[in-house]
Image (cartoon, rainbow, N blue to C red):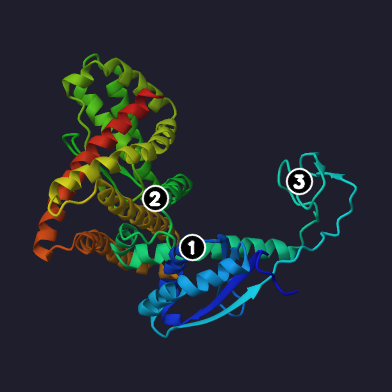
Amino acid sequence: MTPTGKMEVIYEVECSPDPTVVEAFDAWLPGHVREVLACEGFTGAEIQVPVEGTDGQLLRRTQYRVESLAALERYLEQDAPRLRAEAIARFGDRLNFSRRVLAPRTVGSGLPEQPCSCRNCGAAVTGRYCAACGQSRAVHVLSLREVLGDVTHSVLHLDSRVWRTLRSLVLKPGQLTNEFIAGRHQLYLPPFRLYLVVSVLYFALSALLPEGQLLHVDAQGETVIAYGHPSPEADAAKARQELSRALDEAAGAADAPEALRRAAGLAATAVEGKDARAQCSVSLDLPVLRGLTPLLQEACRKVVADSGQRLGAVFLDTAPKLMFAFLPLMAAVAMLFYWRPRRLYAEHLVLFLHVHAFVFLWLALTSVINAVATLEIPVVGLLGVVGLLMMAYLPWYVLRAMRVVYGESRPRTAAKFMAVSLLYFVLLGITMTVGVIYSMLSL
């Protein structure tokens, strides 16, 4: 059938980009399609790409719906030369285009005219899909091949953005932030979603992995140290007795800011993580906290009653919420160090979201390594080397990300890194202290 001048037509453009420009072309194509749709007579468009794992991976097909053949001819004469010139100026001869004009033809569905009931919601279905819930009329039991295909597609496809995002996040510090600031959003996961998913996975992993740490208090009771490797059972029992004795002192003292400080330090360390050697010291000898002494004493009794299990669960539930408040605060701190040239607050926030997403991945891997280190397997000795490399990579990663995003010299970046890090740990300590006290008061 030959389309007439007043009949709607489909203008199809196929492109086979050179492998070296595929990612750049995919990022450019949606904006180009929007420019075409702004031309007179275009009513819609659809970008089609091959399913991963099939032939023709480099093929990109765009179908435009045009209200008439006359409108298409007007576009080809007036607007197409300009838009094609822009594509050539950007990609040169690394694109191979083919174009065709098609006329849409309606095909009957072949479904019986007699309506049936939806198997999902029970509503009457007169077409291919239920108008109430959207379920297909043609429902069948999935085969094993279809189930495995759906799982593979969900894990590996996911717009290919998951693996591209994680690769850039882990191996190229700061690049992911620059990509987002530059407006290239479609190729990667949004920063908030990435941070949320990674942080939730880390805290879930922390709750699932077995305990592997000891609690020790120095002679003055001022410092609590958590070791990331298990010890003999006798030492572990001694540590538990020491924790119980400290909490008993705090629970029974009438005016005991020092005992409460020591007990809160133990509780904070008990729930703060399974990472390699960390130190925590919590001070409750503050006027604002003295009025909470009776409540904290009662909380200590509850901690003793269940060996701190409830406190750990409450803190792990509270920690992600505290980090959501902590990250915007640190983004505001970063603005004090990078005010010339002026940058938007959101740019600092995106950088902290990406860095913390990496930190949570780093902590998750560290937790797994610590858990594997407790097993008696031949390669366990190599985990110490891996742990040292990871410890060195973390500060370098943050320093490199700051330099890539802000573009300053190495000495200036190093100086600001040290200053921001100092403020970071001070504010993080305050935030976590508030979290522990809040968790104890919530028992």
* Amino acid type shown at disc 1: Cys
Disc 2 on helix, strand or loop? helix
Tag on residue 195? 2
* Residue 166, picture quadrant: bottom left
Label 1 close to label 3 by CB (< 8 Å): no
The C terminus appears in which quarter of the rendering? top left
- In the rendered image, residue 275, in percent from the top left (x then y), is placed at 33, 51
The front one of 352 and 6 is 6
- Location of residue 233 in the rendering, given as x and y in whole percent from the top left corner: 40, 46
Q: How many C-alpha atoms fall within 10 Å of the one at disc 1: few (<14), some, or many (≥20)? A: some
In space, the residues marked 1 and 3 are separated at their CA atoms by: 35 Å
Q: Secondary structure at mark 3?
A: loop
Residue 58 seen in this snapshot: no
Kind of element beneath mark 1? loop
Residue identified by numbered label 3: 130
Between the C-alphas of marks 3 and 2, the distance is 37 Å
Question: In the depicted view, which residue is nearer to us: 391 or 119?
Answer: 119
**Residue topped by disc 1:** 39
* Label 1 or label 2, whichever comes before in sequence order: 1
Q: Position of residue 241 (x, y in %)?
A: 34, 34
- Residue type at numbered disc 3: Cys
How crowded is the residue under tag 2: few (<14 C-alpha within 10 Å), some, or many (20+)? many
Q: Earlier in the sequence, mark 3 or mark 2?
A: 3
Q: Amino acid at mark 2?
A: Tyr
